[in-house]
Amino acid sequence: MDKRIIVALDVKEKKKAIDIAESLSDIVFAFKINWPLVLYSSPEVIGEISQYGKVICDFKVADIPYTNSLITERVRDLGAWGIISHSFLGEESLKSVVNAAKGMHVFSVVAMSHPGSDMINSNAMQLMKLSIECGVYGFVAPANKIDDLRMIRSATDRVIISPGIGAQGGDPYTAVLNGSDYLIVGRSVYESDKPELEVSKLQQTAERAIEDR
Ligand code: XMP
């Protein structure tokens, strides 16, 4: 069975991030790096974590096309496998990310998991249409907002990666059953005494949900 878990490494210490990545490298689909780890260490951490698996940079790119291109090129050169971009900035901005990615996998944010995300989530269908036209590889959709996740799944067969599990209240079984392909999990894994056990449990749950679809 494919690996289904993406671990978000939102820790401040580079050594802790690398230790976790090393211990989980055989059992995760990918690692997700967000601004905190880069700002507390350096951009080179992207390449260092890449030695242990695919890295998706969750930089939620949201700027004018030229700046987006510069960000995306640098992320690709540092060794990332994927990048997360916002889509609400419009076609030219998102296209600039896809074009600069040159094979790196671009995930588009069309709905979010936090309280108060209604402003973006209520526009998810329009953002999906635009994202598909721009040629994104996949979508980020919330595991803890099942109605939004189902609607997004019904509109695409591209890859969906989902945060919102555990600390944000989402249930891993329900998320995968309703269309998520990969679960993004941060605190429940890196704050655990046994990260490997946490990932294994989540993987088993995801496999069960896929069988039950
Ligand atoms: P936790 O600790 O809540 O970490 O498991 C979740 C990770 O995912 C990020 N996050 C999101 N990224 N769209 C995104 O693109 C979202 O809706 C979303 N919700 C959470 C969060 O920053 C952390 O890295």
Image (cartoon, rainbow, N blue to C red):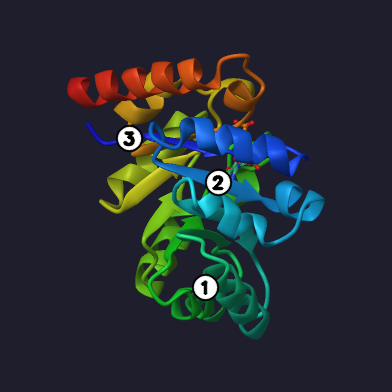
Q: Nearer the viewer, mark 1 or mark 3?
A: 3
Residue 123 visible in rendering: no
> Of label 3 and label 2, which has the lower sequence position?
3
Q: Residues within 10 Å of mark 2 (few under 14, many from 20)?
A: many
Up/down of 134 relative to 139, above or below: below
Q: Which of marks 2 and 1 is nearer the N terminus?
A: 2
Where is mark 3, residue-wise? 3
Q: How many marks?
A: 3
Label 3 element class: loop
Find the distance from the CA under tag 1 to the CA under tag 3.
Answer: 28 Å
- Residue labelled with disc 1: 94
Q: Quadrant of ligand 1?
A: top right
Q: Which amino acid does label 3 sit on?
A: Lys
Quadrant of image for the C terminus: top left
Residue 85's place in the image compared with 100, above or below, is above
- Few, some or many C-alpha atoms within 10 Å of disc 3 (few <14, some 14-19, many ≥20)? some
- Compared to 115, does 41 lie above or below? below
Who is closer to the viewer here, 123 or 107? 107
Which residue sits at x=76%, y=39%?
13
Q: How far apart are marks 2 and 1 (CA)?
A: 20 Å
